[in-house]
Amino acid sequence: GAGVSQSPSNKVTEKGKDVELRCDPISGHTALYWYRQSLGQGLEFLIYFQGNSAPDKSGLPSDRFSAERTGGSVSTLTIQRTQQEDSAVYLCASSFEVADYNEQFFGPGTRLTVL
Amino acid sequence: SQQGEEDPQALSIQEGENATMNCSYKTSINNLQWYRQNSGRGLVHLILIRSNEREKHSGRLRVTLDTSKKSSSLLITASRAADTASYFCATALSGGYNKLIFGAGTRLAVHP
């Protein structure tokens, strides 16, 4: 079966522009997570969805970042008025349900470069 | 701030040798997971160990967990050039919902 997919794989944008990053989780996975990885660093949690609800948005760096999930499936991460420090790889992961033993399956990521 | 810290930051070994990576964390956890990342992109889940477990094996991988010391280790035996990658530990906090907190990773290079 298909894994987690993300689009675009690469995005280059100018400072101040808005960008949308898309994540298609594995079918049937109710939990969805967004992470960010800056160059040479570990992953930083951004937001978590259970179904269409986002109980934890605590990792979003600023109010320029928002995310939504529709139909319990596809999620979109939106960054408004992008800044150079937003440059990173944005990774999405999904799992069957929220439980303390569920493996998260990661997508290939979107590499965002803000010029 | 990062929950986990891996040690060493980088490790260089010859094929056939064993590689040991360590991870320390700060708060109570539900589970600890190890992931591998090639070329800075996709992460591959290697193994999950729950807080009430002390050791798990998967193929050439052996993971230990010491909750009293808040530390874990990943041992890769008989390493291969294909094991060259970055390895991350990630903790799922107690009372949470499996949100993972990652360390900065260990870069492993296995030379033929």
Image (tube, coloured by chain):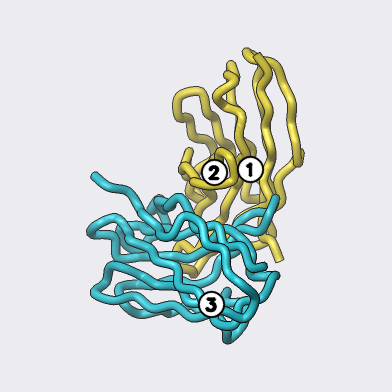
Q: Residue at point 29% right, 65% down? A: A30
Q: Which residue is mark 3?
A: A79
Instruction: Report the chain shown in yellow.
Output: B
Q: Residue at point 57% right, 52% down? A: B90
Q: Amino acid at mark 1?
A: Ser
The foreground one among B74 and B86 is B86
Q: Is residue B47 left or right of residue A28?
A: right
Q: Which residue is mark 1?
A: B72
> For numbered disc 1, what is the local secondary structure?
strand
Q: Quadrant of residue B13?
A: top right
Question: Which chain contains the residue that carries disc 3?
Answer: A
Instruction: Report the chain shown in cyan.
Output: A
Mark 3 touches mark 1? (CB < 8 Å): no
Q: Is residue A30 left or right of residue A112?
A: left
Q: Which residue is mark 2?
A: B34
Q: Position of residue B10 (x, y in %)?
A: 75, 36
Q: Quadrant of the C terminus of chain B?
A: top right
Instruction: Point out the frontmost of discs 2 and 3.
Output: 3
Q: Quadrant of residue B22?
A: top right
* Residues indicated by labels 3 and 1 sit on the same polypeptide chain: no
Mark 1 touches mark 2? (CB < 8 Å): yes
Q: Earlier in the sequence, mark 1 or mark 2?
A: 2
Structural distance between the alpha carbons of marks 3 and 1: 36 Å
Q: Residue at point 34% right, 75% down? A: A69
The foreground one among A75 and B66 is A75
- Residue B58 appears in view: yes
Q: Position of residue A28 (x, y in %)?
A: 23, 59
Q: Amino acid at mark 2?
A: Trp
